[in-house]
Image (cartoon, rainbow, N blue to C red):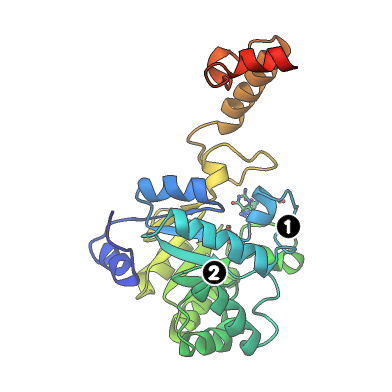
Amino acid sequence: MRSKVNINALQNKVNLSEKITMLTCYDYPMALLEEKAGIDIILVGDSMAMTVLGEETTLGMDLDTMVTHAKAVRKGAPTAYLVGDMPYMTYQISKKEAIRNASRFMAEAGCDAVKLEGGSNMADTVEAMVKATIPVMGHLGLTPQSMAQLGGFKSQGRDCAGALKIIEDARILEEAGISLLLLEAIPPEVGKIVTERANIPVIGIGAGPYVHGQLMIVHDALGFFDAFTPKFVKKYVNLNSIILDALESYKNDVVGEQYPEDGHNYNFMNGELEKLLRQA
Ligand SMILES: Nc1nc(=O)c2c([nH]1)NC[C@@H]1CN(c3ccc(C(=O)N[C@@H](CCC(=O)O)C(=O)O)cc3)CN21
Ligand SMILES: CC(C)C(=O)C(=O)O
Ligand SMILES: [Mg+2]
């Protein structure tokens, strides 16, 4: 087993200019594989609402479900740096609720940190959570929980004012005590400026090549999600077509009576069948 990935190990990679790898994960079998592949950071994302539960937004995700899945992911990935994604309205209402809700990811699921969306508006909350022993990952740019205000899933920071706001928010969040920062769907140049000024690991998802590491939604990387494809997605395999082939083969086997075969059957213990046939 590799040694546990902690925040120092991640900072070491940054210092050595080694890229950090991050993927989402929502269940135990995928966690086993991501751990085996040596992925540094695993995010149990509220994107699970869309990739696993078929919702059109992330807003309906609830904390109990997130904690349940984070627990399963931790079982499959004991050494990855595990981040739990705080669902909509579990941290926006009060610092007290934010701390109590975040603590469940830490205590029940064994997460290493929690992630929350927002900039300067979240600085006080981040400070309170860090004081309460909870490491926090910030998330700027396209923040899906604000989609009603952003006007949908739209890339961000593409004008001067928008870019300046992201750069300033990154500074304020770092000052408030975040341990890591995620940048989503922004121009590479904005990612570069934020990364150069940061003293913490900066991970991008559609934030260009200059950040310290890359995140992708695992269902996107595997071709296991078809509803839409963000521009930054690279599909490494088309799992949908592989799985569909297998499902159709199974169906054809059953309909064509090719399954089950002899080896799939449970046989009687010695002499018992003859006994049954005499008595039945
Ligand atoms: N499967 C999946 N992958 C993701 O990366 C992802 C989710 N789900 N769900 C939550 C958010 C939404 N994401 C998105 C969605 C769209 C763009 C995008 O590139 N949007 C276009 C505009 C599309 C429009 O105008 O409606 C853009 O150019 O900004 C980026 C990230 C990222 N996240
Ligand atoms: C899209 C990423 C950044 C996320 O927050 C999630 O997977 O929920
Ligand atoms: Mg999320």
- Some atom of ligand 2 lies within 8 Å of the CB belonging to the residue at label 2: yes
Q: Name above or below for residue 61 compared with residue 276.
A: below
Image coordinates for residue 14, horizontal then vertical, percent: 29, 64
Image coordinates for residue 78, horizontal then vertical, percent: 39, 59
Disc 2, disc 1: CB below 8 Å?
Answer: no
Amino acid carrying label 2: it is His
Badge 2 density bin: few <14, some 14–19, many ≥20, Cα 10 Å? many
Residue annotated with mark 1: 57
Residue annotated with mark 2: 139
Task: Say if residue 186 shows up in the picture.
Answer: no
Q: Name above or below for residue 247 compared with residue 9.
A: above
Q: Name above or below for residue 212 compared with residue 23.
A: below
Q: Name above or below for residue 252 compared with residue 240.
A: above
Q: Residue at x 58, y 84 (%)?
A: 99
Q: Residue at x 53, y 62 (%)?
A: 71
- Some atom of ligand 1 lies within 8 Å of the CB belonging to the residue at label 1: yes
Q: Residue at x 56, y 13 (%)?
A: 262
Q: How far is disc 2 from disc 1 in space, using C-alphas?
A: 17 Å
Give the farthest residue toward the left.
16
